[in-house]
Image: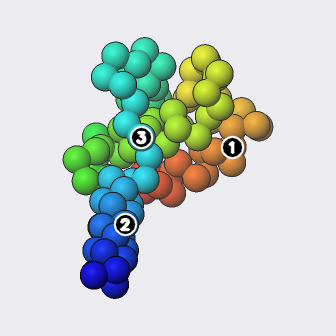
Amino acid sequence: MKKTTTLTAAVLMTLAASVALAQGGYNRPPADDKQYAQCLVYADRLYEGGNEASPIKGQTKAQAWCTCMWNETPDDFKGNLVKFAETRKGKETNKLCEKHSDWSE
């Protein structure tokens, strides 16, 4: 019985990890998050290709990129995510999120 419980727990944990990876591994911003909404609008104005499908199921490249930027900046960050990505400090985060969303030059 103990082996069955351990095996079941292991299978469930593996399944949960697979679902998280399929969703991109990031928390989705709340629907009313102004910072995320601003990111989508601003990125759409500045860059091309954001409406193409990303590797993240159900997200465009812009949505996946903004979700990544939203998750990767500190919780107390209140600025514009797109402008932050273009700064010296934000370049590393930008590279990570470009790779995540498959959205780069």
Left or right relative to 62: residue 97: right
Q: In the rendered structure, which amino acid carries the disc numbered 3?
A: Asn
Question: In terms of image quadrants, where is residue 87?
Answer: top right
Residue 92 on image: x %, y %: 69, 48
Q: In the rendered structure, which amino acid carries the disc numbered 2?
A: Met
Q: Nearer the viewer, mark 1 or mark 2?
A: 2
Mark carried by residue 13:
2
| Front residue of this view, candidates 9 and 30 | 9
Left or right relative to 104: residue 94: right
10 Å crowding of disc 2: few (<14), some (14-19), many (20+): few
Q: In the rendered structure, which amino acid carries the disc numbered 1?
A: Lys
Mark carried by residue 27:
3
Mark closer to the chain start, 1 or 2: 2
The answer to whether any part of residue 11 appears in the image is no
User: Which residue is located at x 34 percent, y 84 percent?
Assistant: 3
Compared with 51, 23 (above or below) is below
Residue 79 on image: x %, y %: 61, 18
Which residue is identified by label 1? 91
Residue 69 on image: x %, y %: 53, 38
10 Å crowding of disc 1: few (<14), some (14-19), many (20+): few
User: Which residue is located at x 36 percent, y 25 percent?
Assistant: 30
User: Which residue is located at x 31 percent, y 22 percent?
Assistant: 31
Q: Looking at the image, which residue sits at the far left?
A: 58
Compared with 69, 53 (above or below) is below
Separation of residues labelled 1 and 2 (CA atoms): 34 Å
